[in-house]
Amino acid sequence: MMPTGFTINMDVNITATYLAAKQHHYHFFAVYLYLITHLISEQPEFMIAQRDGQLGHYTNLTPSYLIFHEDNQTISGMWTTYDANLSNFHENYLTDLKQYQAQHGAMIKADQPENAYMINMNPWLHFNSYTPLTFNGLPNYLPVIEAGKYVVQAGKRIMPLSFTIHHAVADAYHVSHFFQRLQSSLDHPEDWLL
């Protein structure tokens, strides 16, 4: 197969989940990390990796993301251990923030697991397209996900979301299925955000 990847950008309505997160005193960013990771973990084609020339897949992924340092306006890489229980994951996220947020550097939490995938949120820019590019020439089969700044339109919070994946492991059908499940989950946080 031609070594290509693709990016699909969609606007998602985060209104119900945003309000539910605030009501339950969760950080919306942590809820975003949890929900995306949870949904990805239900689609094995998004968890494929190569080790020693062999393809296989993980049973779940670890979100690897960036944190912003207000003091010098820089970013650092960070990761939080995924837990299928949102409350536990949220506590893991808060513990990591408390322990590492004051540190600076490219990657402030050591020993990132090999099942880490890139997910981030750019709260300063509402975009209509975002395409990450790799420059090392190595195949990366895990998704790269980026959200942008939400805007309020007709009383709804609309957030852009970019999903990039290697075409060898997934096609538009798989990504469209992901976005359908994501929007349904965002519309019905009562089913999972408790």
Image (cartoon, rainbow, N blue to C red):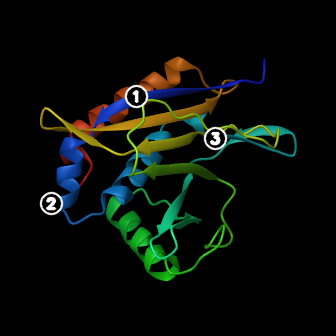
| Label whose residue precedes the other's in the sequence (1 or 3) | 1
Residue at image mark 1: 10
**Mark found first going from the N terminus, 2 or 3:** 2
Q: Which amino acid does label 3 sit on?
A: Leu
User: Which of the 4 image quarters holds residue 46?
Assistant: top right
Image position, residue 139 (x, y; %): 77, 37
Residue 41 visible? no
Disc 1 crowd, CA 10 A, few/some/many (<14, 14-19, 20+):
some
Nearer to the camera, 92 or 15:
15
Q: Mark 2 points at which residue?
A: 23
At 30% across and 63% down in the image, what residue appears?
Answer: 27
Task: For mark 2, give the secondary structure.
Answer: helix
Q: Which amino acid does label 2 sit on?
A: Gln
Quarter-wise, where is residue 104 in the image?
A: bottom right
* Crowd class of label 2 (few under 14; some 14 to 19; many from 20; radius 10 Å): few
3D distance between C-alphas at marks 2 and 1: 26 Å
What residue sits 60% from the left and 49% below the top?
Answer: 117
> Element at badge 3?
loop
